[in-house]
Amino acid sequence: VQGETGTGKEEFAKLVHRKREYLKNEKIPLVSVNCANFNNELSLSLLFGHVKGAFSGAEKSTEGFIAEANGGILFLDEIHALSLETQQKLLRVLNDGSYSRLGETKTLYSKFQVIAATTKNLDAEVAKGNFLLDLRIRLLGIEISIKPLRERKNDIPRFVDMFLADKDIKLRPAQYKELIKHCQSCYWQGNIRQLFSVLNAWVAMCDGDINVAYFPKYNSMREPNKLSSVGKDSYGKVLSVLERAISLDISFTEAIEEVECFIIEEALGLNPCVSDVYQGLQLSRNNFYVKRRKYGLTL
C-alpha cells in the first residue's frame, strides 16, 4: 500500500483484517509494526523474538511480532525504513514462514498474510540501493495506491460526517455546509489524519459553543508554495495603503482596517496556534474572532 502519510494505509489493513474475520467467522491477529521506529538490533529482536541472554539486557525470552502474527496479518508500516540486514532476514520468513529467534538455532514457523505500507516508491528505493530487490519481489501482489486527500475532496464530507457522529455533534444545515466548504478549500498536507486533528482542535477552541467561525487556520492546511510569509510584497501592500491614505484616496478608518486585516492574516499564517496569535496581539478571544469574521479570515 503506497501513499502519503495520513492517507489511511493502516486503516486499509484494518479493513482487510475485519473482512477476513468476517469470512472466517473467527478472531485472527492483526499485528501492526511501525518500521520507522526500529534501529537495527531492536528490529531483529522485536520482529523475530529472542531467547534469554541473546544480547546484553535480554533478561527474558520473547516471541516477537512474527510469532504473534501466526494465523493472521502482519502489517509492516514504513517498510522502506528497515535496515538492509533486517530486510535480508525477512526474506526467509516471507518465502516459507521459517525463522529463528535471536540467540537460538531452532527453526520456528509462522504462517501469516503480510501487508506492507510505504510513503516511498519501492522500485525507486531498489534503484538507489536502499531496498533489496529480492524483498521487493517477495512483496509483489496486489498493489494499492491511496491518493492524497486533496485529490479526492469529494470524500471529505464522509470523513466530516464520521467525525461529527463520533463526537455526537449536530450542526444546522447552513453551518454544516460552511464547515464542508472550509474543509474542501484546504490543501491538507497531512491528509485524513490532519483533517481529524484540525477538527478536534476546532471543537476544543469552540469550548462548548460549536461554531464554524472558530475553524482554525494552520500553515500545513495550505498549499506549500502558497504559505504565508512576510516579505517585500507583503510590506508593499501596507505601504500602498499608507500612500492611499496620505493622498486622501481612502479614509483613515479604511486604512486602519486594511492594515489590521493584514496583521491578523500574516500572524495567522506564521503561527500554527491561534491562541498564540490573539494573546500575542493582546486581543481578547472574542474580539479576535469578531475581527476574523469581519475580514473573512475564518479559513
Image: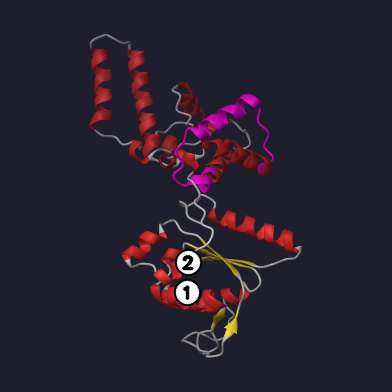
Of residues 269 and 207, the one nearer the viewer is 269
Display coloring: secondary structure
Can you identify the residue that label 1 sits on? 43
Residue sitting at 64 percent across and 42 percent down? 162
Decide: is 144 above or below 210: below
Left or right, 248 with reference to 116? left
Expressed as whole percent of the image width and height from the top left, the position of residue 52 reads: 55, 88
Q: Is residue 134 magenta?
A: no
**Residue type indicated by callout 2:** Cys
- Determine whether the residue tagged by mark 1 lies in a helix, strand or loop: helix
- Determine whether the residue tagged by mark 2 lies in a helix, strand or loop: helix
Expressed as whole percent of the image width and height from the top left, the position of residue 197 reads: 53, 46
Query: What are the residue bounds of the magenta stretch?
Result: 167-195
Q: Which mark is residue 35?
A: 2
Left or right, 39 with reference to 200? left
Q: Is residue 180 visible?
A: yes
Neighbourhood count class around disc 1 (C-alpha, 10 Å): few under 14, some 14–19, many 20 upward: many
**Residue type indicated by callout 1:** Ser
